[in-house]
């Protein structure tokens, strides 16, 4: 059984009272958007075409647009009985037409998918004026060019977004690093001040050793999820050391 994107587009267009050109256009409105998304969903389920291929054969859309449209129909199939009924009827009709195309060469040719990439290769490989493409082939080539430009624009937009996110995270990292250096300097100053003028007793040495241990732990935990607990532990050890010195 041969089911093509073109067969699906023509069947859906006739069922909803629109044209294939409407489905492939950028027109908005439920009268066009719903059957457009329906045709993409049927193509995804009844053919072996990938999302990028469906976009290339059905209006020159990028794959994320196709995915969005398919998801909307899949959600509606479980919540809208009318859409679900229309979907099942279209599956039945398209299946019958697909089986008929296998038995009739004329029908198969009419509903054949024209690959814009193959058309472009034929243009480039043919000698001058030796290749006379059909209007359908020219149309498919135009759709392929549109699809390529759309995909390229999408890729550039994603790259720009990634660069912006990278810059934002770098700014956050720089801010956190500066904050950590300032806090570390403050803690080291506090430790130095506490050590001045003290008498070395066992308790004081033990408290001071604890502070050193906690400071090392904080250095190891910087820029990790353990940094905050390590900082709190160091502050607690500093308070203990200060109390110990005040008792001497």
Image: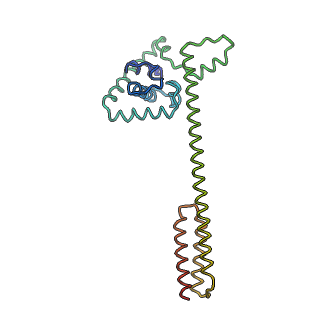
In the current view of this chain or complex, which residue is farthest to the right?
127
Instruction: Give residue 96's quadrant in the image.
Output: top left
Horizontal side of 2 relative to 75 (left or right) equals: right
Q: Nearer the viewer, residue 243 or 87?
A: 243
Q: Position of residue 37 (x, y in %)?
A: 42, 29
Q: Position of residue 79 (x, y in %)?
A: 32, 35
For the C terminus, which image quadrant?
bottom right
- Give the residue drawn at x 54%, y 64%: 226
Q: Position of residue 205 (x, y in %)?
A: 60, 83
Instruction: Give residue 89's quadrant in the image.
Output: top left
Q: Nearer the viewer, residue 30 or 107?
A: 30
Q: Position of residue 230 (x, y in %)?
A: 54, 68
For the N terminus, which image quadrant?
top left
- Give the residue drawn at x 57%, y 47%: 165
- Give the residue drawn at x 41%, y 17%: 97
Callout count? 0
The figure's colour scheme reads rainbow
Q: Nearer the viewer, residue 184 or 220?
A: 184
Horizontal side of 130 relative to 17 (left or right) equals: right
Instruction: Give residue 220's quadrant in the image.
Output: bottom right
Horizontal side of 197 relative to 228 (left or right) equals: right
- Give the residue drawn at x 50%, y 31%: 51
């Amino acid at each position: 059984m041969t089911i093509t994107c073109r067969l699906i587009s023509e069947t859906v267009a006739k069922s909803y009272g629109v044209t294939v050109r409407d489905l492939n256009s950028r027109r908005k409105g439920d009268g066009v958007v719903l059957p457009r998304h329906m045709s993409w969903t049927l193509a995804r389920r009844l053919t072996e075409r990938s999302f990028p291929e469906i976009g290339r054969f059905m209006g020159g859309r990028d794959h994320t647009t196709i995915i969005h449209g398919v998801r909307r129909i899949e959600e509606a199939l479980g919540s809208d009985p009318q859409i679900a009924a229309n979907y099942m009827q279209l599956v039945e009709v398209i299946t019958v037409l697909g089986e008929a195309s296998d038995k009739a060469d004329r029908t198969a040719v009419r509903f054949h998918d024209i690959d814009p990439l193959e058309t472009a290769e034929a243009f480039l490989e043919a000698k001058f004026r030796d290749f006379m493409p059909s209007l359908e082939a020219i149309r498919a080539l135009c759709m392929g060019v549109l699809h390529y430009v759309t995909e390229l624009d999408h890729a550039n937009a994603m790259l720009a977004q990634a660069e912006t996110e990278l810059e934002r995270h770098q700014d956050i990292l720089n801010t956190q690093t500066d904050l950590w250096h300032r806090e570390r300097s403050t803690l080291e100053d506090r430790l130095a001040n506490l050590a001045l003028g003290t008498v070395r007793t066992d308790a004081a040495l033990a408290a001071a050793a604890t502070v050193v241990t906690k400071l090392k732990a904080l250095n190891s935990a910087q820029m990790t999820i353990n940094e905050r607990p390590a900082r709190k532990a160091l502050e607690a050890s500093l308070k203990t050391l200060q109390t110990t010195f005040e008792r001497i």
